[in-house]
Amino acid sequence: MPRLFRRVFIANRGEVAARVARTCERLGITPVFGVSEADRHAGYVRGHEQVVLGPGRATHSYLDMERVVQAAVQSRCSALHPGWGFLAENPVFAALCEAHGLTFLGPPAHVMHRMGKKTPAKRAMGDAGLTLIPGSEGILADAAEARAVADTIGYPVLLKAESGGGGRGMRVARDASEVERAFQEARAEARAAFGDDRVYMERLIERGRHVEIQLLADRWGNVVHLGERDCTVQRNHQKLIEESPAPVLAADERERALEAAARATAAIGYVGAGTMEFLLDGDGTLRFMEMNTRLQVEHCVSEARTGIDLVEQQILVGAGHRLAFRQEDVRIEGHAIECRINAEDPFDEFRPAPGVIERWRAPEGEGIRVDTHVTEGYEVPPFYDSLLCKVVARGRDRDEACERMIAALEDLVCEGVATTVPMHLAILRSEAFRNHRYDTGSIPGWPQESR
């Protein structure tokens, strides 16, 4: 029987670092935090082992691969959890961990490399039986090829960065006259953001819904899915609200896609927790977009419906354990909704709001879970994303989950910095949200007609 790790290095910060540490401690594992100078006195690391990686800016701390690996090795850790963001989907970093005897709690580096590049990932998923979005066969050589592909698949089209993420390196062309401009702008932004100016093309699916499927796999090819999540409510390609099950997904398409996603995950030799992202088109078909080879921010939604701790499974699989359950053992029940609460002012163009949290109280109640690193007196630093907490509400059905979420957000107290709570309440109370009248290009109930 494989043993668990004694010490795990957490190469991340904030809410995800605190969340990984909780599971480590429950399993009897000592978490060791890698922190920047900006985070070394934060409440979530107080009383725990920590190693200072460097100054506040992430490029000299959380993104410095060699510093992170050196810190993990010198602190006598045998495994490393990357969280999400930063280095979590960097195959070079995963390979560096492996080269230094650290178990990287994610997929093998070669699988991450394959799925991290969008066009090879699409080919692999198409070969495994998933439905794809029509587009170019691979990287576009020039604007002339982009025009030829667009003329073939039909307008509007979306130019996308091969190494992209977070909505960067994307441009729309609605007719032939816009293709060259969109191609050049997408390349320029991709080069600036990722150091890689390669782009490809997909047909633009407008008024679509964003749906993703949560997967778990072990080293022996056993794969299970934990259902799907709807992440359609977004702003600038950043998710605001996630829920499960997806409200407008037909039952037959749900079952087909879940089974196909599990087969595809096994076919590529995936290991650990991963998420396949899809667009639901106007015909009700889920079309594969990409695979995120890491733990997702919204994993709590799937945990709420299944009772399965995804971080625990990452650790067990990384330590060499087989999955202890099969697909038929996974019970997916009720409805769960997650709101991401950021330190941003929704009434001022979502301007970031760093500063000191003078008063803080997280909501409680039946069906409510709050994942956070925040304590009273915590200073929100200006260097990183502004996520303060995630509130998850579970109910017997969608209406009950929504009502519990509204009550929880009304009870949340955060004084000293602006938050996105007013926006979330407006969305949850809106007729458009309750009746599913929204898509990836709209935020139901926001902006409000009056403050």
Image (spheres, rainbow, N blue to C red):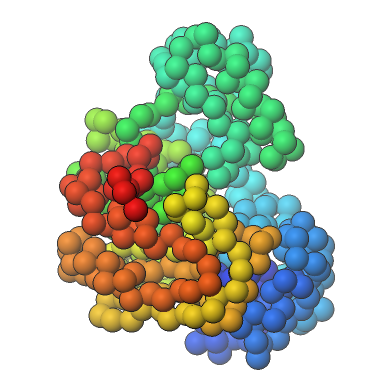
Residue 322, position in %: x, y? 47, 71
What x and y, as percent, mark residue 230?
A: 33, 51
Nearer the observer, 253 or 37 = 37
Q: Tell me, yes or no, if residue 131 can be seen here.
A: yes
Q: Position of residue 19 (x, y in %)?
A: 52, 75
Question: Can residue 334 be seen in this snapshot?
Answer: no
> In the picture provided, is 381 more to the left or to the right than 424?
right
Q: Is residue 416 above or below residue 198?
A: below
Residue at the limit of the structure toward the front, as seen here: 450
In this rendering, position of residue 242 left or right of residue 343:
left
Q: Nearer the viewer, residue 184 or 152?
A: 184
Q: Please state if 103 lies on the left or on the right of 251 as rendered.
A: right
Q: In the picture, residue 249 is in which quadrant?
A: top left
Look at 41% across and 54% down and name the residue there.
240
| Label tally | 0
Picture quadrant of residue 28:
bottom right
Q: Residue at x 21, y 67 (%)?
A: 403
52 shown above or below 274: below
Kindly identify the residue that appears in the image at 61 percent across and 69 percent down: 355
Q: Residue at x 66, y 57 (%)?
A: 86
* Relative to 418, 60 lies left or right: right
Counting from the top left corner in percent of width and height, residue 59 is at 77, 56
